[in-house]
Amino acid sequence: MENCLKEMRKKRKVTQTELADALLTTRQTIYLIEKNRVVPSLELAFKLANFFYCKVEDIFQYTSRPVPAKDDLFSIF
């Protein structure tokens, strides 16, 4: 999953700490989301969208991985 949270936050001139405080989470959580190391809970994703007055999909973009062929799914058994 990709996101543009950092860009949106900077455009609005909000620090990680200010955003975290507004959403009742930690600065570390915001940092990890911005670095794509953590995928936020659905609740936090909606809180972020509400904070920035946008849709969740305006912040987060799902990048799909190739699905293995049916035969490959059972090759490990």
Image: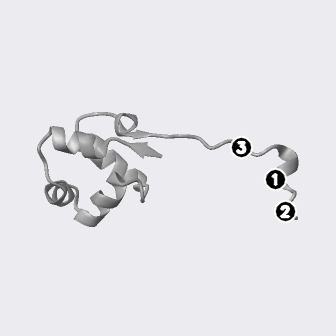
Crowd class of label 2 (few under 14; some 14 to 19; many from 20; radius 10 Å): few
Please give the name of the residue rendered at 38% of the width and 43% of the height, measured from the top-left corner.
Answer: 3
User: Residue beneath label 1, please?
Assistant: 73
Residue type (three-letter) at the residue carrying disc 1: Leu
- Which residue bears the numbered disc 3? 67
> What element does badge 2 sit on?
loop
Residue in front for this viewpoint, 43 or 25 = 25
Q: Name the residue under label 2.
A: 76
Specify whether 60 is left or right of 70. Answer: left
* Type of amino acid at the residue the image marks with label 3: Val
Residue 27 percent coordinates (x, y): 23, 63
Labels 3 and 1 touching (C-beta < 8 A)? no
Q: Nearer the viewer, residue 27 or 25?
A: 27
Q: How far apart are marks 3 and 2 (CA)?
A: 15 Å
Q: Which residue is drawn at 37% across and 53% down?
A: 43
Separation of residues labelled 3 and 1 (CA atoms)? 9 Å
In the visual, does 11 lie left or right of 75? Answer: left
Residue 1 in view in this figure:
yes
- Near mark 1 (Cα within 10 A), the count class, few <14, some 14-19 or many ≥20, is few
